[in-house]
Image (cartoon, grey):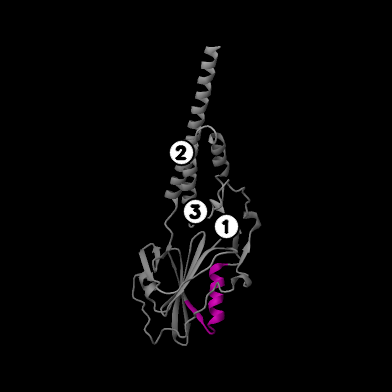
Amino acid sequence: RNVETKNSGKIRTLKKKKKKRISMKYITYIILGLFLTACSIPASYIKEGNNKIVLNLANGSIVIDSKGDQTYKTGGCLAKSFFYENDEVQVEYIKVKRACEWSGLAEGLYQDFIQNNMKGLEKTSSIKIDHGDIYKFNKDQQYFYFISLYDSTSHTFIIDYSGEIVSKILEKSLSINSKNQLTPKLKKEFLKNYQFKGYFQRDRDKEVMIPPMQQIVLHKLYFYPIFDRIYQQNKNTNLYLKDSIEKMETNLLQNIQKLSHDLNVLYVEDD
């Protein structure tokens, strides 16, 4: 009987060790997957913060000083947006949620918005650039440049009154003197009262319902089944490992939340 007890004790110990190895293996796979995902994310063509808007384009970075009030919007179909303007430039960034889409061509909708609010404009030329297009609009021998930038998840619309940004993008002087600079300025926000404009629509086929993780209210994650299995296997067997899993879980959630600003595929936000 003593021998059987010892053997059964060894078997239970081995099972516990095996569970630990399996659990740590899952954690390792998750960390490795997130690391590879992060490495594979291309640098965003636009970054905003610290009173600066940075455009990362093929011929280098262009910095727009954005000191002053900026307008931010989220909710509905908007994952993130911001609006900034001064006498020389107007910038509007728009990122829609994964379960939504534009109700038409984003660039076309914005051009309609400009022309509806600045009557008599004529589009005279266009240039294809990295991540987008540049258009020149004329009115009464005065003009400005409209820059449309985009990637798979976001659009940025820039009205360049001085020609300074376009000059930097094209690497040649296109500065507009004060006589040729179109006045008055647009000074209107595309997303103002956007809920009533019909710019976006929900794509029900893209909506995914995922059960929330225990004690976590940040986002609904595709990692739920893996974490829940690890948690259930170890919650009563090893308190140290349980604490490690919970800390690891929190760190991973923070990383996912950070990555989700650029990738809209790892989670589904609560509406």
Span shown in magenta? 105-124
Residue 211 in percent (x, y) is at 62, 47
Nearer the N terminus, badge 1 or badge 2? 2
Q: Quadrant of the N terminus?
A: top right
Would residue 152 be found to the left or right of residue 99 on screen?
Answer: left
Residue 96 in percent (x, y) is at 55, 62
Q: Is residue 151 magenta?
A: no
Residue 218 in percent (x, y) is at 54, 53
Q: Is residue 123 magenta?
A: yes
**What's the amino acid at mark 1?**
Arg
Q: Spot the residue most to the front.
A: 2
The reply to whether discs 1 and 2 touch (Cβ–Cβ < 8 Å) is: no
Could you tell me how far apart the alpha carbons at marks 3 and 1 are, in whole angstroms?
A: 15 Å
Could you tell me how far apart the alpha carbons at marks 1 and 2 are, in whole angstroms?
A: 28 Å
- Which residue has dot 3 on it? 257
Q: Residues within 10 Å of mark 2 (few under 14, many from 20)?
A: few
On screen, residue 215 above or below 134: above
Asked if one can make out residue 143 in the rendered structure from this viewpoint, the answer is yes
Nearer the N terminus, badge 3 or badge 1? 1
- Which residue has dot 1 on it? 98
Give the structural element (helix, strand or loop) at label 3. helix
**What's the amino acid at mark 2?**
Thr
The reply to whether discs 3 and 2 touch (Cβ–Cβ < 8 Å) is: no
**What's the amino acid at mark 3?**
Gln
Give the structural element (helix, strand or loop) at label 1. loop
Would residue 203 be found to the left or right of residue 240 on screen?
Answer: right
Tell me the chief SS of the magenta region: helix
Give the structural element (helix, strand or loop) at label 2. helix
